[in-house]
Image (cartoon, helix red, strand yellow):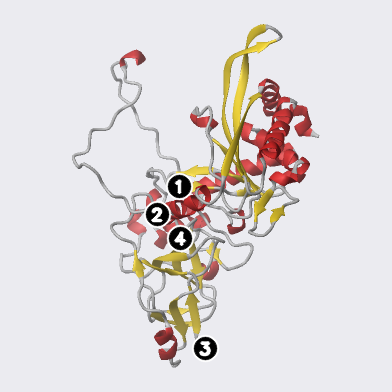
């Protein structure tokens, strides 16, 4: 039986994918469910599995090749099968990324792609690794030519960073494959290295004598061209499709956050309760406001305006290589504590590389908060096909007039970007009024 290996479609906007590397070589036996290749999409790196068994007879698209979704990239068949017709029908010409690989690269997925709703795609940016020594003795290691180790790419990376010899491990994954948890189990069982003895040193100079930050030396070259990652290329392609064709307008409001800040402080002091962030309060307020004013929870569909009756809110998360907006679903039906727990988990998995494919699309409204970067006010670009996005700035202490007196208060600016094909100015303003009222009367967020 001949099995065609096609470039999978892993997101709504995905038009092409890049073969990072083949994990099987031509002539190697393949069983159904074996991981055969690693693919880079516009949002993530994922591993793809074989849907049929036999031998990897032909690699159509080599490592580094980029082809449209649905195009043939390889053929699995029995040794006696005639694959001449299948190979002959394959499109000719494979695009390859120009130049060297980008300095920032998406890490591979621990979980594999199975073309099901439970698919796990991951996006992760890795800091410089710190060396951790496991308890295995180098003398016990097999010779270098002992054979290929079956391990997931993420397990290999963690092992390389921590100095673990994969040849000494027993895999618990499918077919004895070594996965991340196998490496982490070894690291957890390894004895802690003895604390180094630090010799006495002269006292450090006073803090005032040190520079506030270090400026790197000026590079010798005048400029350098860094090839686009798939994520950055997708951003470059999609955002002009929003800013150009979509007629944006903006409304801004200044919110008194004194009571919301006090409520957040009291909630975070409760033992055992999830920590609540300002973003969580804004998510809850927007979800309730979207239920009251569903005209903002809408998108332009060409000949109709689609109004959504559930608030699936996208939360912008910045990564070193770009920006993704994972989706927190049914926010209008979840209490604040649940939103706090799920939004924190969503952001951590986005940064740690464990987002599911269904969490990468389907938002009906988005929030972008740059307050943690001391940004007072900004406007965000709408993420199509959504009709609006809310930009949130820092909570700042500033003098405010209150009953004829000047006092110090906490203020936060919010700017709503609206698609004028869907939302009128008065509608956007009323929505922002509702969000402001909910934040200024924060007990409403708890009921």
User: Which label's residue is closer to the chain start, 3 or 4?
Assistant: 3
- In the picture, the disc for residue 438 is none
Q: CA distance from mark 2 to mark 4?
A: 34 Å
Q: CA distance from mark 1 to mark 2?
A: 9 Å
- Mark 2, residue position: 229
Q: Is residue 184 above or below residue 441?
A: below
Give the percent coordinates (x, y) of residue 147: 36, 70
User: Which label's residue is closer to the chain start, 4 or 1?
Assistant: 4
Circles 1 and 2: CB atoms closer than 8 Å: yes
Give the percent coordinates (x, y) of residue 189: 50, 48
Q: CA distance from mark 4 to mark 1?
A: 35 Å
Give the percent coordinates (x, y) of residue 92: 37, 78
Q: Secondary structure at mark 3?
A: loop
- In the picture, the disc for residue 169 is 4
Q: Is residue 67 left or right of residue 426?
A: left
Q: Quadrant of residue 230?
A: bottom left
Give the percent coordinates (x, y) of residue 39: 45, 64
Q: Secondary structure at mark 2?
A: loop
Of badges 4 and 1, nearer the viewer stands: 1
Is residue 177 visible from the viewing direction of this image?
no
Seen from this angle, which residue lies furthest left? 220
How many marks the image carries: the answer is: 4
Of badges 3 and 4, nearer the viewer stands: 3
Q: CA distance from mark 3 to mark 4?
A: 35 Å
Is residue 443 visible from the viewing direction of this image?
yes
Q: Quadrant of the C terminus?
A: top right
- Mark 1, residue position: 322
User: Which label's residue is closer to the chain start, 2 or 4?
Assistant: 4
């Amino acid at each position: 039986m001949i099995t065609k290996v096609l470039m999978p479609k892993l997101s709504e906007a995905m038009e092409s994918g890049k073969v990072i590397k083949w994990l099987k070589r031509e002539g190697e036996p393949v069983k159904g469910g074996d991981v055969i290749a690693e693919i880079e999409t516009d949002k993530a790196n994922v591993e793809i599995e074989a849907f049929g068994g036999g031998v990897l007879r032909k690699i159509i698209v080599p490592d580094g090749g980029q082809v449209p979704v649905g195009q043939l990239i390889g053929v699995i068949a029995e040794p006696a099968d005639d694959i001449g017709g299948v190979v002959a029908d394959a499109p000719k010409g494979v695009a390859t990324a120009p130049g060297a690989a980008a300095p920032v690269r998406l890490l591979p997925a621990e979980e594999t792609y199975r073309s099901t709703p439970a698919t796990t795609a991951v996006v992760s940016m890795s800091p410089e690794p710190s060396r951790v020594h496991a308890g295995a003795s180098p003398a016990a290691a097999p010779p270098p030519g002992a054979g290929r180790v079956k391990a997931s790419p993420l397990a290999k990376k963690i092992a390389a960073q921590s100095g673990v010899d994969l040849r000494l491990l027993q895999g618990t994954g499918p077919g004895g494959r070594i996965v991340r948890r196998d490496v982490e189990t070894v690291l957890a069982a390894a004895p802690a290295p003895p604390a180094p003895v630090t010799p006495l040193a002269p006292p450090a100079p006073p803090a005032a004598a040190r520079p506030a930050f270090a400026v790197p030396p000026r590079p010798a070259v005048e400029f350098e061209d860094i090839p686009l990652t798939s994520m950055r290329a997708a951003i470059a392609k999609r955002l002009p499709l929003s800013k150009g064709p979509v007629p944006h307008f903006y409304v801004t409001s200044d919110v008194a956050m004194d009571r919301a800040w006090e409520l957040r402080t009291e909630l975070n002091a409760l033992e055992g309760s999830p920590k609540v962030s300002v973003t969580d309060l804004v998510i809850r307020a927007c979800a309730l406001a979207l239920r009251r004013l569903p005209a903002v929870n809408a998108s332009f569909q060409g000949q109709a305006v689609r109004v959504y009756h559930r608030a699936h809110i996208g939360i912008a998360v910045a990564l070193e290589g770009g920006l993704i907006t994972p989706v927190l679903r049914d926010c209008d039906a979840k209490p604040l504590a649940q939103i706090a727990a799920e939004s924190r988990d969503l952001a951590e998995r986005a940064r740690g590389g464990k987002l599911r494919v269904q969490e990468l699309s389907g938002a009906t409204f988005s929030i972008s908060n740059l307050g943690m970067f001391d940004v007072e006010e900004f406007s965000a670009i709408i993420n199509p096909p959504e009709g609006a996005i809310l930009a949130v700035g820092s909570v700042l202490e500033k003098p405010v007039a209150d009953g004829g007196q000047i006092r110090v208060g906490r203020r936060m600016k919010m700017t709503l970007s609206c698609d004028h094909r869907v939302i009128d100015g008065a509608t956007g303003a009323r929505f922002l009024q509702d969000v402001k009222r909910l934040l200024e009367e924060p007990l409403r967020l708890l009921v």
